[in-house]
Amino acid sequence: MNDKSISFLVDLLKKSRFTVALTGAGISKASGIPPFRGEDGIWNKYDPMLLDLNYFFQHPLESWKFMAQTFFSFLDDSKPNPAHIALAGLEEENFLQAIITQNIDCLHQAAGSCNVLEYHGGLDYLKCIGCGDRNIFEKKVLSKLPPVCSKCGDILKPDIVFFSENISRKILQKIADFLPRTELVLVIGTSAEVYPASLIPVEAKRAGARIVEINLRETTLTNQISDVFIRGKAEFVLPDVLRKLKK
Ligand code: NAD
């Protein structure tokens, strides 16, 4: 069943003049980073409120403790896995024009992908909630939580999008610019439950793109928005697709 879908995807990739990948936490699972939902999901252990912007303003220490125990603890050892590497290979071979990632782990860039839009920001930068100063994350800031700005003394926040926080207008504009000419969207390892990222495949479909989903399990997009659903681990499916394209 998957063999047929994979051959179909290979065909679509060959024909498409503008292909975009939308990735989610599932693509980084093989790099040792747990997703939010599902088996081993972070929300099985923690309250999602810890990543709410208003909660962060009122309880920065609690929110920072959560981030130090989760995101920052596994970032150290995580490396791109075969799925990230295959997407970088697809870009290099000109089969993929952009990646929109909901992930904050910077693993697409580490794998060598160049055109990466971080929809929810990245953990590699911290921003001061007072003066707006933005600096590269350094591990030493975790020694005293919550970390504070060396310029104004206010609290530093990872430069990622919290719940109830807006997506960067620059990112939204870039996506709006290329969505109308997108012919194929690969939706990889995302539950498509986080709004407004979940609208990207819907809008792309409306503009005429084909949608191919790669996931372990069906999502709200499957059978409604997706033209093809490939059930499987991204770290196996994507290298297979790249191999077949290069044949
Ligand atoms: P999610 O946790 O809601 O869903 C993960 C999805 O990945 C599920 O549908 C699951 O079935 C699928 N999946 C799991 N393993 C897979 C594999 N090996 N191959 C293919 N699919 C697999 O994740 P989401 O949809 O990205 O949304 C939640 C938010 O989580 C995002 O906004 C992101 O910012 C944040 N997040 C990011 C990271 C990260 O940066 N790595 C980690 C946790 C959460």
Image (cartoon, grey):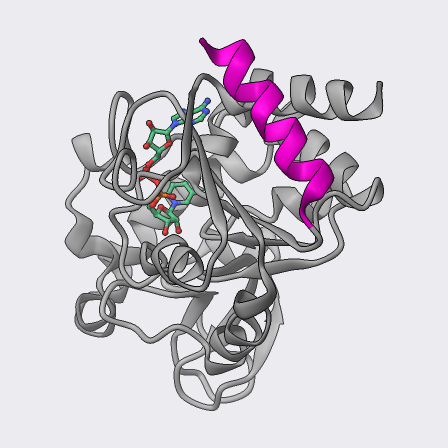
Q: Position of residue 67 (x, y in %)?
A: 36, 49
In this rendered view, identify the residue nearer to me: 153 or 160. Answer: 160
Q: Position of residue 131 (x, y in %)?
A: 47, 91
- Vertical comparison of 164 with 192: above or below: below
Q: Position of residue 64 (x, y in %)?
A: 33, 56
Quarter placement of the C terminus: top right
Q: Residue drawn 50% across and 25% down?
A: 32
Q: Is the stretch drawn in magenta largely helix, strand or loop?
A: helix
Quarter placement of the N terminus: top left
View quadrant of ligand 1:
top left
State which quadrant residue 192 falls in.
Answer: top left
Q: Residue drawn 62% across and 36% down?
A: 12
* Residues rendered magenta in the picture: 1-16
Q: Residue drawn 47% across and 62% down?
A: 119
Q: Please tell me how many numbered marks the rendered image carries.
A: 0
In this rendered view, identify the residue nearer to me: 42 or 102. Answer: 102
Residue 147 colored magenta? Answer: no
Q: Is residue 79 visible?
A: no
Horizontal side of 108 relative to 28 (left or right) equals right
